[in-house]
Image (cartoon, rainbow, N blue to C red):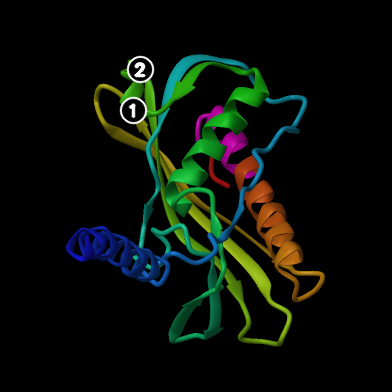
Amino acid sequence: MRRITLLLFVPLAAGLILAGCIGKLPGSGAPPKLYDLTPKSTFDPNLPSVNWQLIVQEPVAAANIDTSRIIARQTPLTVEYYKGVAWVDRAPRMVQTLIIESFERTNKIVSVGREAIGLRADYILKPDLREFEADYTKGSVPSVLVRLNVKLIKMPERTIVSNATFEHRVESESASMDSIVAAYNEALDKVLRRTVEWTLRGGPPS
């Protein structure tokens, strides 16, 4: 009888020990708070309608931007990230989605999408996300800088029709994370509008 009691007790004790270990595994803390940004929805009422189809590629970005973490730049030579918060997706992927949705909201283009959907495009928009950060180098309340270079490529020739760089900087109203994300949203909003309007007008000089 004593041997049976011991056999029943040992698995129970092992289970308690395992449960204690699982509770201490790295990465088991609270998930980060996720932030999303919004597409542009208002444009120049004189924007022309176009009868061509467009593919928007995922923006190229440096390794420090190609992440879902939100950049807080303390000095010109260092890159840090906010703790406990993140974008809903990798920044380039998120920006690609917002560019596409912004084009859709113009109701001025036949079709726009990602290359993955198999769209036969007349043009390809190739973005390069060069800046996407909250900049603390001039004070304790950051300014947000968004810079996007875009190339409009004619298909099937794959010739570059034109290229331009759009950027906008917005001072955050406070040091709170919600205010900083609102500044990101406003800065990107301006860049999205200029990108969409420039593209639909055939890529004239900005």
| Quarter of the image that includes the N terminus | bottom left
Disc 2 to disc 1: CB gap under 8 Å: yes
Membership of 55 in magenta stretch: no
Q: Which residue is mark 1?
A: 115
Q: Residue 111: where, in percent of width, then height?
A: 49, 16
The spot of residue 178 in percent (x, y) is 74, 62
Left or right, residue 56 beside residue 75? left
**Which residue: 56% across, 28% down?**
200
**Quadrant in the rendering for residue 106:** top right
- Viewer-nearest residue: 20 or 197: 20
Q: Which residues are magenta?
A: 194-203
Task: Name the residue carrying label 2.
Answer: 119
The answer to which image quadrant residue 176 occupies is bottom right
Residue 201 seen anywhere in this rendered image of the structure: no
Q: Verify whether residue 201 appears in magenta.
A: yes
Residue 167 visible in the shown view: yes
Q: On the rendered structure, is 74 left or right of 178?
A: left
| Kind of residue sitting beneath label 2 | Leu
